[in-house]
Amino acid sequence: MGVAKPDEDGDAVYNGARDNASGCATIMSVAKAFATLPAPARRSILILLVGAEEQGLLGSKWYAQNPTVHPGKIAANINIDSAAIFGRARDVAVIGKGKSRLEDLLVQAAAMQDRIVVDEPFPDKGYYYRSDQFNFAKIGVPALYFKAGTDSVEHGDAWGREIEDRWRAERYHQPGDEIYDEWDFGGMVEDARLAFWVGLHVANADEPPGWMPGDEFEAVRERALAEVAD
């Protein structure tokens, strides 16, 4: 929102430090990791920073409607949004869990960090259909959106849920979304490594991942693949 209505303290600057500067920083870190590999991955990797999610997923919608690569040739989409700013978590939450085989790779990667993959902690929010991976899913591309869970390594699950609820009530889409003392970058680092590891394995695999059998986007994927079949 840039500069908008001041809060009770007179602060009118909507910094967006977590949502979504932290996500952009994570994406750029993952991009740098891919760019510095000793040998390039077998598949091309496209890094997108799309705008206007809050205004209706407009940036990702535009790309999905005007893709630079046919959807049948896009192996997967990994969406990174607001990062984990409250430290390391024992769990990894998949938004829309049970939709694609990308989750199998995430489980493997999380296990290397002694973490478990769980369902999203706030399913009532409908985040899968409100985040940018949704537009890729609609054109058939298997899409993964995960976040650090709430089970804090240092403080436990109750603390993790309480601090997330407090951030959402006091700072989400408000001028208070800025860096402050409770930020802990350990969780951001771990999640960036997860995204990189999953992306690298997709990029080097013989076959791309698919949707779970019977998923709502499976038929769209099959049509996209048929359009590019030899």
Image: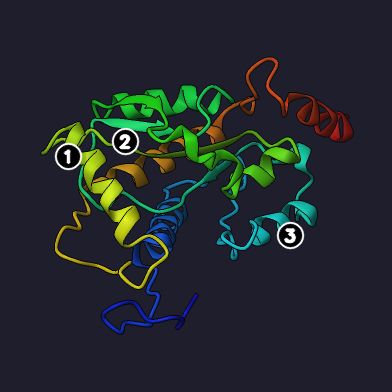
Q: Nearer the viewer, mark 2 or mark 1?
A: 1
Q: Quadrant of residue 49?
A: bottom right
Local secondary structure at mark 1:
helix
The amino acid beneath tag 2 is Gly
Report the residue marked by disc 1: 159
The amino acid beneath tag 3 is Trp
Mark 3 nearby-residue class (10 Å; few <14, some 14–19, many ≥20): few
Q: Nearer the viewer, mark 1 or mark 3?
A: 1
Image coordinates for residue 48, horizontal then vertical, percent:
58, 58
The amino acid beneath tag 1 is Trp
Query: How is the model colour-coded?
Result: rainbow
Image coordinates for residue 19, horizontal then vertical, percent:
41, 61
Residue furthest toward the left?
154
The foreground one among 78 and 99 is: 99
The foreground one among 133 and 151 is: 151
From the viewer's perspective, is 192 left or right of 81? left
Compared to residue 228, the image places residue 59 above or below, namely below
Local secondary structure at mark 3:
helix
Local secondary structure at mark 2:
loop
From the viewer's perspective, is 159 left or right of 148? left
Q: Earlier in the sequence, mark 1 or mark 3?
A: 3
Residue furthest toward the front?
8
